[in-house]
Image: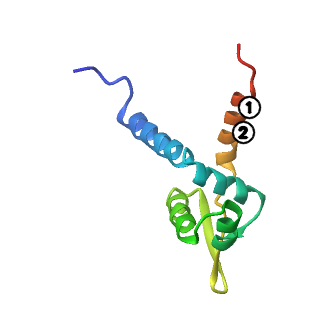
């Protein structure tokens, strides 16, 4: 058996980081995050912006909310979504910087 190079705590952290990367690797969820970076939006507005059905957007928002990447508040009959915090954009900005770098 191969010895573990990390402690159980580190393994748990690695699993959590991996989960976040899996969540943000989906193009629809990533698009939603970029839309919410600019302003709070309803499901309908997000669906219209991405030319998708509201049910599909709601499903993606649930995943983002469960992962604590977005939060929701009620405004009348609508739910308004916003980013939970901006930490995720530190990561995304680094990725964007990386892909814009010229090849070496």
User: Dot 1 corresponds to which residue?
Assistant: 97
Mark 1 crowdedness (10 Å alpha carbons): few <14, some 14-19, many ≥20: few
Q: CA distance from mark 2 to mark 1?
A: 6 Å
Left or right of residue 74: residue 5:
left
Tags 2 and 1 in contact by the CB under 8 Å rule?
yes
Q: Nearer the viewer, residue 45 or 79?
A: 45
Q: Which mark is residue 93?
A: 2
x and y percentages locating residue 67 in the rendered image: 51, 56
Q: Position of residue 73 (x, y in %)?
A: 64, 75
* Left or right placement of residue 78 versus residue 17 in this view: right
Outermost residue, top side: 104
From the viewer's perspective, is residue 25 above or below residue 1?
below
Residue 91 vertical placement versus 44 (above, below): above
Residue 69: x %, y % from top left: 59, 56
Corner quadrant of residue 42? bottom right
> Circle 1 sits in a helix, a strand or a loop, which is it?
helix
Q: Secondary structure at mark 2?
A: helix
Q: Quadrant of the N terminus?
A: top left
Q: Position of residue 84 (x, y in %)?
A: 64, 59
Q: Are there few (<14), some (14-19), or many (20+) residues within 10 Å of tag 2? A: few
Which dot marks residue 9? none
Q: Residue at position x 45%, y 37% from top?
A: 14
Q: In percent of the image, x 52 and y 46: which residue is there?
A: 20
Q: Residue at x 39, y 27 (%)?
A: 6
Q: Quadrant of the C terminus?
A: top right
Residue situated furthest right in the rendering: 38
* Colouring: rainbow
Residue positioned most to the bottom: 76
Report the front residue among 26 and 97: 26
């Amino acid at each position: 058996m191969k010895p573990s190079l990390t402690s159980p705590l580190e393994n748990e952290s690695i699993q959590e980081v991996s989960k976040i990367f899996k969540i943000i690797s989906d193009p629809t969820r990533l698009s939603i995050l970029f839309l919410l970076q600019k302003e709070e939006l309803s499901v309908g507005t997000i669906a219209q912006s991405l030319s998708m059905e509201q049910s599909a957007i709601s499903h993606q928002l649930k995943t983002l909310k469960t992962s604590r990447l977005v939060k929701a508040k009620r405004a009348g009959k609508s739910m308004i979504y916003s980013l939970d915090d901006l930490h995720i954009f530190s990561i995304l900005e680094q990725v964007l910087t990386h892909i814009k770098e010229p090849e070496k």
